[in-house]
Amino acid sequence: MRYAEWCIAAPTLEADIAAAAMGLDDIGHSRVLYGSLRELGTPDVPDEPGSYANVAYLDRPWTDWTAFVAANGVLDSGFTVMIEALAGGNVEVLRSRLKKMLQEERYHAMHGRSWMRESRAAGAVEQARRDAIVWIGPEGGDVDELHQKGILSLGVRELRRRLDEQVSGASASLPIDWNAWDPVRRRIVPGGIDDLTLTMLQGLAEKRYMPAGA
Amino acid sequence: MGPLGLMGFTRVHNEVQEYEVFARKTRLEPLRQVGSVVAPDDELAMAYARATYDEERWVEMMIVPKAAVIQLWAPGEAEA
């Protein structure tokens, strides 16, 4: 969704097209993940504002291209390392379905890496890295538990290490207050996605412009 | 600022080069030129080529820096 907002606003035409294509890829990835969850017996979550477990970095539209670049190069890589861990784990549905996703994410990472070299995005990169680490969760938490069971092939430390490989020269970040961490929404700061984006995600904006029976 | 407005980001790639994009749909057909992209490095060129020319189910895609192409003769020129 945030990628799509930049598909006519990126600094070059190629980057516009890439933003649209990566947004479409990620919608496809969500569909695969939700489909896999359903198949694994996970009940649907009610479609309410409070149930959206997005990382804080996605709460508001990005007002600067460097925010896009950091999301693309760092946050997206945080998701990718987790997908790698799921694809390498012992759940057959995930092992077989997530491979294509990783192939596509390779190009997202290349796009993000190249733009990070080009842009002065240090502030946004640090924020995105922090949000990705918060999303992965604390050491000794649920992720490490799933790693011990073999569901994830990587634990928190290895996930963080792989993420840092993507962010070369990452500065030492401020300590994270894990006591304030919400294990369901996987974030520390309260709040959520903005109302306008939420109505679009829920299809309400669509209904407003195209009333039933029209 | 931001989407649909003026951006704070002004520096767009100091140096770029053009890459030709080649692809084919089956192993039996030859690679053909499907277009080109402009990028500052190979990684971004690969990302752009995939994003821009993914309308077909290609079995193979590759990019070549245009500077690496050696032209023997051009249309209208006599064969050397």
Image (spheres, helix red, strand yellow):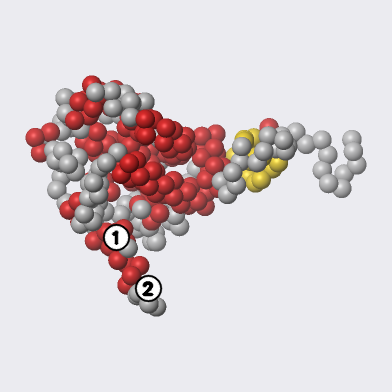
> Which residue is at 41% across, 36% downward?
A97
Q: Position of residue A66 (x, y in %)?
A: 36, 45
Q: Position of residue A165 (x, y in %)?
A: 36, 26
Q: Chain of mark 2?
A: A
Q: Nearer the viewer, residue B3 or A33?
A: A33
Structural distance between the alpha carbons of marks 2 and 1: 14 Å
In the rendered image, which residue does mark 2 sit on? A210
> Which residue is at 55% across, 39% downward?
B45
Residue B19 visible in the current orientation? no
Q: Position of residue B77 (x, y in %)?
A: 87, 44
Which part of the image, by quadrant, shows the N terminus of chain B?
bottom left
Give above or below for B53 relative to A99: below
Give residue A69's quadrant in the image.
top left
Give residue B74's quadrant in the image.
top right
Callout 1: SS: loop
In the rendered image, which residue does mark 1 sit on? A202
Give residue A91's quadrant in the image.
top left
Q: Residue furthest bottom?
A: A214
